[in-house]
Amino acid sequence: MQKRRLGRTGLEVSVLGYGAGAVGGLFTKGAAADQERAIARAVERGINYIDTAALYGNGESERNLGRVLGKLRPNVVLGTKFRLKAADRANVADAVARCMDESLKRLNLERVDLFQLHNPLVAKDADDHMDVEIALNEVVPALHRLQKAGKTRFIGFSGVGEPAAILKAVDSKAFDTVQVDSAWVKRLAALLGVLRLALLLLAITLGVVVIAVVFNTIRLQVLTQREEIAVSKLLGATDNFIHRPFYYTGALLGLCAGAVALGAVALALRPLNTAIAEFARLYASEFQLATLPPLGMAALLAISAGLGLVGAMLSVQRHLARLN
């Protein structure tokens, strides 16, 4: 079995680890004899890293693993994980310490080799999705205290969440390990950057289309109403008086285009997010498209109306000048 250094720990672990999670379910609902045979076989084949978490089977994985390790006494590196709830934000340090003690009790150990944050890291704190600033400024100091107390040798995080938040946690060098290949996250962040640029170019293209459509619509109106325009001028109507209805029409057309765009996005959001969620899972991440806030919607409608007005102004100035 090949071995590699685990993050910044200096520990040499097998390239294949044993996961005692819910996938397969052996350590959450399997028979005790099968659990013992599985670990014995894994260790025999050279696996020396075992992964579990309090979340797996609501603690059953840790309990069963503690029983098996207590019986077999294998020379392995053990990592477990904890997840904080929204209510734990009131006192993060105490919550982290409590999670550590509960895991040690279930594992029947005095310490673990690796204790990892299991919450997805994000930019905005919500439920079990943790603001990366809370992780760095509150969780990490609490984990350092556990290290000093001898309850864990190293600290890490599970590497799920938003790419920017994950990269910030990695770049902080506050953690010894992360359970996701950071190169994947960087590639995903680069891909998202390309997608943002593509969306910007698409938005510019659609803006030009709105101007062109309004330009042509107003041109047809000017040509259709040229006799009325000529009569109005003979009666003393000013250019502003003649131009104003066309400007209003252009702005209204642009506003309608913006409203249609918002409606189309709202209809497409759910199927798009389903596909995006599947894609994100390939990168052990979580993200989705969100609707614009009310202020953003108002800004989009205002920009759309402005583009329509620009198209109307260009068309009126060009075609009325020809009539003159």
Image (cartoon, rainbow, N blue to C red):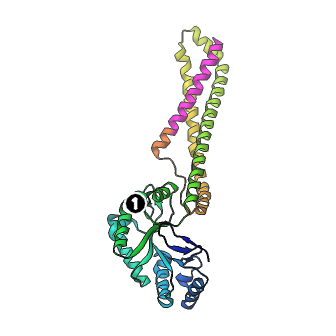
What's the residue type where badge 1 is placed? Leu
**Residue 205 found in image quarter:** top right
- The image shows residue 184 at horizontal and vertical percentages of 58, 59
Q: Quadrant of the N terminus?
A: bottom right
- The image shows residue 210 at horizontal and vertical percentages of 61, 33
- The image shows residue 279 at horizontal and vertical percentages of 61, 59
Residue 82 belongs to magenta span: no
Looking at the magenta stretch, what is its main secondary structure?
Answer: helix
Confirm whether residue 249 shows in the render: no
Q: Quadrant of the C terminus?
A: top right
Which residue in the structure is indicated by mark 1? 136
At 65% from the left edge and 14% from the top edge, which residue is drawn?
A: 322
Left-right relation of 84 to 48: left
At 51% from the left edge and 86% from the top edge, which residue is drawn?
A: 74
Residue 307 belongs to magenta span: yes
| Label 1: which secondary element | helix
Report the span colored magenta: 300-324
Q: Nearer the viewer, residue 148 or 12?
A: 12
- Against 191, residue 313 (above or below) is above
- The image shows residue 10 at horizontal and vertical percentages of 48, 70
Left-right relation of 241 to 173: right
How would you rate the neighbour count of disc 1 (Cα within 10 Å): few for under 14, some for 14-19, many for 20 or more?
some
- Against 2, residue 214 (above or below) is above
**Residue 288 found in image quarter:** bottom right
Confirm whether residue 65 shows in the render: yes
